[in-house]
Image: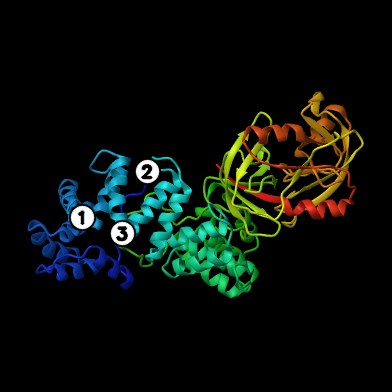
Amino acid sequence: MIPRPRRVRPLAPLALGLLLALGAAPAWAGYDEGLAAYQKRDWTAAIREFKPLAAEGNPAAQARLGHMLFEGLGGAKDDVEALKLLNAAAVAGDPLAQHWLGSAYFNGRAVPKDISQALVWFGRAADKGQPESLHAMGEIHFNGLGINKDEGKGVEYFKRAADKGWAASRERLAQFNWDGRAMPTDKAKALEFARLAGDAGRPVAQFILGLGYLLGQGGVEKDMAKAAQWFRKAADQGHPQSQHNLGVMYVNGHGVPKSAPEGYVWMALGAQRAPANLKQNYEKERDAVAARLPPADLDTARQRVAQWKPSLPGQQVANAAPAPGAPSSAPSTQESATAPPRSTGGRVSSGSGFVVSMDGVVMTNAHVVEQCRTITVKPQDGPAQVASLKAKDSANDMALLKTTLRLPEIARFRQDRPLRSGDEVVVIGYPLSSLLSREPNITAGVVSAMNGMRGDPRHYQITAPVQKGNSGGPLIDMGGNIVGIVTSKLNAMKIADKTGDLPQNINFAIKADLARSYLDSNGVTYQTAASSAQMSVADVGERIKRVTVFIECQVQ
């Protein structure tokens, strides 16, 4: 359910231009006066001017009068009369009325809730370039609100609205570029969108700008003073992570004068509003500051917290209707005070893969891409890109991704004699990407057994060190050819609990024969090569890391 329509605020010059362009009407006497009053929030005067025009059939006047009756602006609410006016104006083609009618159907307000009807009216307004309807369509498609989720389509709507100056869409694009959701991470572009949206008063965008200056990312130098300024703008509006970060900066004197009482105030406000996953940590840090304050200072600070109210800067308004699913003033969750914002409703996992065809098919483990809503792949020498799932076999833990990668060479499978126990092998992948650098990690070992756990003939047992994030990466012989897919490691602590012995380097890989059969069954053309050459571990790594990719998954 999306929030009820907000009360309108005075239009900025840009928004006024949009409104006039999109809802322009014939030069009816009194219309300009009514619009001027509407802009000034002089609802009584606006109703006085619009009412006779609406009775004469002026769609723009009907739309705005319908909005005021819908919200009770300047008098009592009248949903029946509001819907009558909005219907008439919407049928006549007024995009503001079409948007409000779409909002009514989406929320089930004064009409039965009907997503299909909401899409019809939002879509008609969006086709006319109505920016908030474009944003609404973006939220509906991106989040799958009553329809099948299509993040790509949602992003396209956000881009169209952003091109028209709609701040909420610019804020969403700032989040996606910062987060790497539905598109490769691009912090510089994120800050470009965030600056435009932040200047328009959007708190999440202001928070992202604060992070950019705090961390020195996105093409800006570290600047604690600027970070504090942006956090303050968002904190004043009640943004909890910004409030917490600002409080920490006051406590430490970073970018602002050092003041533990001031720090306590902001940290306490952030703790009050914090999302569930951050609340306990925020409260613990707040209490640690409180323990160091003199009782008189603490009492004064607590009084300030109790009396504090968020500021409500003028918001951009094109039609005064809410965007379905639009983020509230509370941002998406983050793991720490300096962590980038993450989109709500998901977490990020990662793994490895390797390119097996000239048309960019990537092979990996099924469990690496399980339940992903967005998958990105990044080769060693190239930018990240969004990938799609081509095929998945959960029973054998294999998956294929479709990408637009066109590499000079691809992985080759070993075509001749089978491996033996004791043969040397190399593992390449991206383990522990959150801790280690984002470059291929190369380890070596041997095939220690020809079968896996409990004698599973599909797997090799190997001694090459494997960590979380290696999953889906290639297992290579010393000729530089693929002999398997790294899939798992033994849980040493569980084994130790049962046996009293801590096993070392017991890891598993899917045999290449099974992988090749899977490629055959999915019509993927791959390459093979003989394994006569014997290279060093470094040489094997140098060759194969060029076709190994880092995979990041935004999980449902």
| Residue annotated with mark 3 | 130
* Residue 1: numbered disc: 2
Give the spatial CA distance, label 1 vs label 3.
12 Å
Residue 11 percent across, percent down from the top left: 30, 68
Q: Residue furthest right?
A: 422
On the rendered structure, is 232 left or right of 431? left
Quarter placement of the N terminus: top left
- Along the line of sight, which residue is nearer the eye, 450 or 202? 450
Give the mark toward the camera: 3 or 2. Answer: 3
Please name the amino acid that badge 1 sits on: Gly
Q: Tell me which corner region of the image, top left, top right, bottom left or bottom right, holds residue 419.
A: top right
Q: Tell me which corner region of the image, top left, top right, bottom left or bottom right, holds residue 413.
A: top right
| Residue annotated with mark 1 | 93
Q: In this view, does 140 lie above or below 211?
A: above
Residue 224 percent across, percent down from the top left: 61, 72
Using a 10 Å C-alpha cutoff, classify the residue at mark 1 as few (fewer than 14 neighbours), some (14 to 19) or many (20 or more): some
- The residue at 22%/52% (across/down) is 70
Is residue 511 visible in the rendered image? The answer is no
N-term-proximal mark, 3 vs 2? 2
